[in-house]
Image: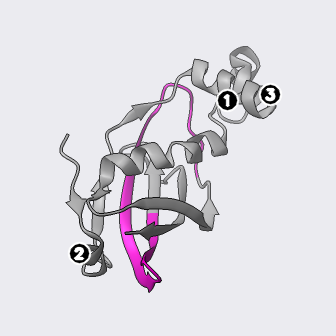
């Protein structure tokens, strides 16, 4: 997979455009269990496949924040910035989890540059994202990530 690379100055010209799409990443029950251990969220809909079969989703599902935690890795497959000295997370806007992610599902990220504003020494980027199961009717996570990029 070739990752598109942009300079900081080129990003200002790409507002409103798709920056890229990630590869598909499969979510395993082992990942879900490990995430539960790290976060202390051991709700049965995530970690008990037997009980989850009769639950609302028919199987275990990934934590919403597990899905979100893949954002940085998948964004790295969507684009890179050639002249960034440092890029830091600054926050999130409008985060929602419209659809569950059943264990074993594949997820793909689509990133769109919504805004690029000059800040001292660089840019503040608003990157719209959808993380979803390919061909599913609704995305699993949607929002806007805010990044600060310094030269």
**Label 1 belongs to which residue?**
35
- Mark nearest the camera among 1 and 2 is 2
- Mark nearest the camera among 2 and 3 is 2
**Label 2 belongs to which residue?**
10
Alpha-carbon span between mark 3 and mark 1: 9 Å
- Where 128 falls versus 65 (above or below)? below
Of residue 23 and residue 49, the one placed in the foreground of this image is 23
The crowding category of the residue bearing disc 2, from other C-alpha atoms within 10 Å (few below 14, some 14 to 19, many at least 20), is few
Give the left or right position of residue 62, taking residue 149 as reference: right
Which region of the structure is painted magenta?
99-128
Residue at x 36%, y 67% (from the top left corner): 112
Question: Quarter of the image holding residue 150?
Answer: bottom left
Q: Which mark is residue 42?
A: 3
| SS assignment at label 2 | helix
- Mark nearest the camera among 3 and 1 is 1
| SS assignment at label 3 | loop
Residue at x 30%, y 55% (from the top left corner): 80
Q: Which mark is residue 54?
A: none
């Amino acid at each position: 997979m070739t990752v598109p690379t942009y300079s900081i100055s080129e990003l200002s010209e790409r507002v409103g455009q798709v920056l890229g799409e990630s590869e598909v990443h499969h979510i395993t029950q082992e990942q879900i269990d490990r995430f539960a251990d790290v976060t202390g969220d051991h709700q049965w809909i995530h970690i008990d496949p037997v009980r989850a079969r009769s639950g609302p989703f028919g199987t275990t599902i990934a934590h919403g924040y597990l899905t979100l935690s893949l954002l940085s890795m998948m964004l790295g497959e969507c684009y890179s910035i050639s002249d960034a000295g440092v890029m830091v997370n600054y926050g999130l806007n409008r985060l929602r989890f419209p659809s569950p992610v059943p264990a074993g599902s594949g997820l793909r990220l689509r990133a769109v540059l919504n805004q690029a504003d000059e800040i001292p020494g660089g840019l503040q980027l608003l990157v719209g994202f959808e993380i979803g199961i390919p061909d599913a009717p609704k995305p699993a996570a949607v929002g806007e990530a805010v990044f600060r990029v310094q030269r």
